[in-house]
Amino acid sequence: MKQGLPLPRWSRTVDWPLLSRILAAVVGGYGLTTIATLLASLLLPFLGVQREEALFAATMASFLLFAAIILCIFHAASATRAWLWLAGFAAPAGILLWLLWPEGGL
Amino acid sequence: MKEGLRQSMAWLHSWTGLLVGWVLYFVFVTGTFGYVNSEINRWMRPELPLAGDLLPAAEMLPAAEKWLRHEAGDAKSWFIFLPGRRGDTQLEAGWSAWPEGEERYGAFTRSAIDPRTGLGMKDAVRETEGGDGLYAMHYQLHYMSYDWAIRIVGICAMFMLVAILSGIITHKKIFKDFFTFRPAKGQRSWLDAHNLLSVTALPFHLMITWSGLVFFLFTYMPTPIDLLYPEGPARDRFYERVYGPEEGGATAKHGTLQAMAPLEPMLAQAERLWGKGSVSRIIIEHPLRSDAQVRIFAHNRTQLSRLGPILHFDGATGARLPGKGDQEVPSAAFSFALLAAHEGHFAGPILRVLYVVAGLAGAAMIATGLLLWSAKRKAKHAKAGTLPAGVALVDILNVGTIIGLPIGIAAYFWANRLLPAGWEGRGAWEMHLLFAAWAGTFLYAIWRPAAKVWIELCGVAAAAFGLLPLLNVLATQRHLGVTIPRGDWTLAALDLGALALAALFLRMRRTLIAKRDAAPAPRRRNAPAQEAAIA
């Protein structure tokens, strides 16, 4: 970086990896929580839980899950790893969600 | 963060705590006053009667009904609030108008009612937002729209949840440290106090934070329900299944105006079931219409539920209707118990005191955490002899919030006694003075040297609360000299509570002065080295 383009002064004082990690926690974490909540709402009925119950219980638990995801992201070895973990969980969950999605909604 | 779990969690704990600590302190302090909102409502309206024998409910009911028929012949709902709950002494009634245009709710009017004549006492009782105003602020904030406020508070609550969980992980020796307190050791003592306050009331902190988020469940996590049950018939069916049939009644006029079944037999039936003086409120939907519905609520002293026992009646025929029945969705039933634990409506006097103590412990936990953050940084920079601007800013925000907010709340009570009782709009001005006094403490904190501002503002807070009972003697007939002999312990408890707060601030001031006098001018010991190890 030192010999590269002359970056503006403010960009050198910004902790970019930290910013990326915060973004991963707040935006990525919330997105993953939403996907997980949706998935739980669709999967729990297969275990005999009522559909309304599944959504309500999953949404109640979503805040605890979001908090847990945030803790994991701030414990990850690096911001890049945190994003990779997020994607690693979100991609299969998203695909499963797409496969499970009922025809024409509910 | 290539460090151990405890280090990364400690970092997360201190920064999440710092970023929203001031808002959370505001939420905890105003919410704690909210646990005695009903009691403060009466304290702030000294025109209301002292505790004493109440008229039988059956005699008060016709008075309230007379006022409602006169004031609100075509209302969406009527409310009759019978006294007796939490030291309330005054019959009150209220009504909601039909919503107009795009409104979700119609305007709500409430007034004290003379239980003998059925005349409104609006002009006889001073206008105030009372304890309900403080209670509402803890999640609606003030001077901003409801939709913004609940989202800001929701984000802060989410930070709180993260701070609590990361704090638990950081704090490995929970049991051993619980019995450790090293007073007068600077940063170390703040840490011990912070740990003690956090761990003692940990179940309360977890419950209050999680349930606070659950209050606005589908506002904070809207996407799943939006996708699975889109707005419209699907959503309505979902809500009906989860919450039971809507109790508020349709917001459109359906029934025709006609005579209503008398309310007295319904009240008598409720009192036969629950005992005399056990009814807290009566709500009539679509009063004086053919589709009128009556709900009678008991004082909830036993159930971990938000509303307590309820009887339902058909307002046109007077026939008793079946209740909602058992909750079909267990997690929703669990959420209602969780919300009931948050609100504490069911709490009797002893449990209510515990709620207040737990709330204050929460506020103190946040305050000690904020102070710990700044103490750590100061210790680090002490050698250099300079203070970074960020730490100085945190110091100003700390003192302006931790001591300034209580001063603002004291100003709210002073305004209640000093503003002319009959002045229109005084309720809003009581609020303005709360925020003006609070803003004043910030200006004061910016203007005064940091070493003096804590001591001086603690003195102001102690005086503001300590002199409140004295102001009461001068301004009202509801002071300790009257309330204690008459056995009105609800009102007396608030004056005594003000004295207790004054004693607390006085104690803090004395400690700060002792610390200032004991501090050696030049640093001799190499204290920061030991303290840095803790961080």
Image: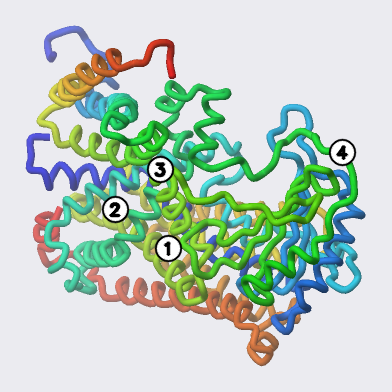
- In the rendered structure, which amino acid carries the disc numbered 4? Thr
**Residue underneath mark 1:** B359
Residues at marks 1 and 3, CA–CA distance in whole angstroms: 17 Å
**Residue underneath mark 4:** B256
Decide which of B214, B77 is in the foreground and name it: B77
Q: Is residue B113 left or right of residue B324?
A: right
Disc 2 with disc 4 on a shared chain:
yes
Residue A98: name its quadrant. top left
B284 to B512, vertically: above or below: above
Residue at the (35%, 48%) spot, across then down: B392
Instruction: Tell me the quarter of the image containing the N terminus of chain B.
Output: top left
Residue at the (47%, 57%) spot, across then down: B340
Query: Dots 3 and 2: beta carbons under 8 Å?
Result: no
**Residue underneath mark 2:** B374
- In the rendered structure, which amino acid carries the disc numbered 2? Ser
Residue A11: name its quadrant. top left
